[in-house]
Image: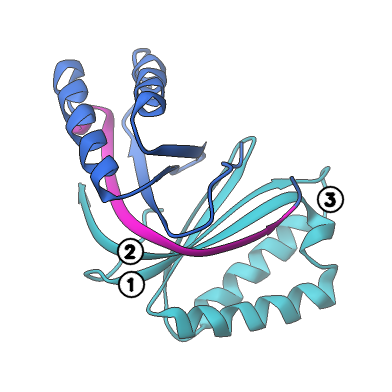
Chain colours: A blue, B cyan
Amino acid sequence: MIATTPIPPYYAVIFTSVRKDEDPEYSEMSELMLELAKEQSGFLGVESAREDVGITVSYWRDTESIKNWKKHTDHFLAQKKGREQWYKLYKVRIAKVEREYGFGK
Amino acid sequence: MIATTPIPPYYAVIFTSVRKDEDPEYSEMSELMLELAKEQSGFLGVESAREDVGITVSYWRDTESIKNWKKHTDHFLAQKKGREQWYKLYKVRIAKVEREYGFGK
């Protein structure tokens, strides 16, 4: 649900997307990507929701972990179809989390 | 949908939340907050989706704009009920977007 992340600084990859029409393979691909992420060194957590737009925010220890993760996803997606086949449009933003606050557990 | 943002650096406020039970006033409050955000100096765009978890990412020119926006929301939410009344839990992360890439328009 809400990722439990360490005290900042750490990194966020904000992936926003609009999907193409329903593809039965999509959710399988999506789950595999998530499993792959969780195995990576430096992975801290992930949050995801989709309505008109899909937002997946994954959290990482540093830019090095993100670079390695990108290498894996590029390879994985190349085998699968490539991101352009699943999405009408998407945007990836790499951001350094500087502070955080919240409420509840 | 997907926010059109300038060339980095700029800032992202990642607001992740789990709501309490349905409250008819919630969507009104939520829309008003969005309108308020759009009026603020330094506001660049917003993306939002909710399933089990809600994710709203708003984009801002700098930390100063975010500080002003927080002042407004605190004031607004104090009048309304306060965030703790609407949400079971939430987390706010302030992050500096360092780079971005994407596909599609």
Label 3 – label 2 distance at C-alpha? 34 Å
Discs 1 and 3 carry the same chain letter: yes
Q: Main secondary structure of the magenta part?
A: strand
Instruction: Give the numbered dot on residue B71.
Output: none
Instruction: Provide the residue designation for mark 2.
Output: B97
Q: Chain of mark 2?
A: B
Label 1 – label 3 distance at C-alpha? 34 Å
Instruction: Provide the residue designation for mark 3.
Output: B23
Residue B7 lies in what quarter of the image? bottom left
In-front residue for pair B4/B56 = B56
A85 left or right of B63 in image:
left
In primary-sequence order, the first of circles 2 and 1 is 1
Instruction: Provide the residue designation for mark 1.
Output: B10
Residue B66 in picture, x, y percent from top left: 51, 78
| Pointers 2 and 1 in contact (C-beta within 8 Å) | yes
**Residue type at tag 1:** Tyr
* Region rendered in magenta: A83-103
Residue B64 in picture, x, y percent from top left: 47, 85
Q: Chain of mark 1?
A: B
Badge 2 crowding class, 10 Å Cα cut-off, few under 14, some 14 to 19, many 20 or more, is many
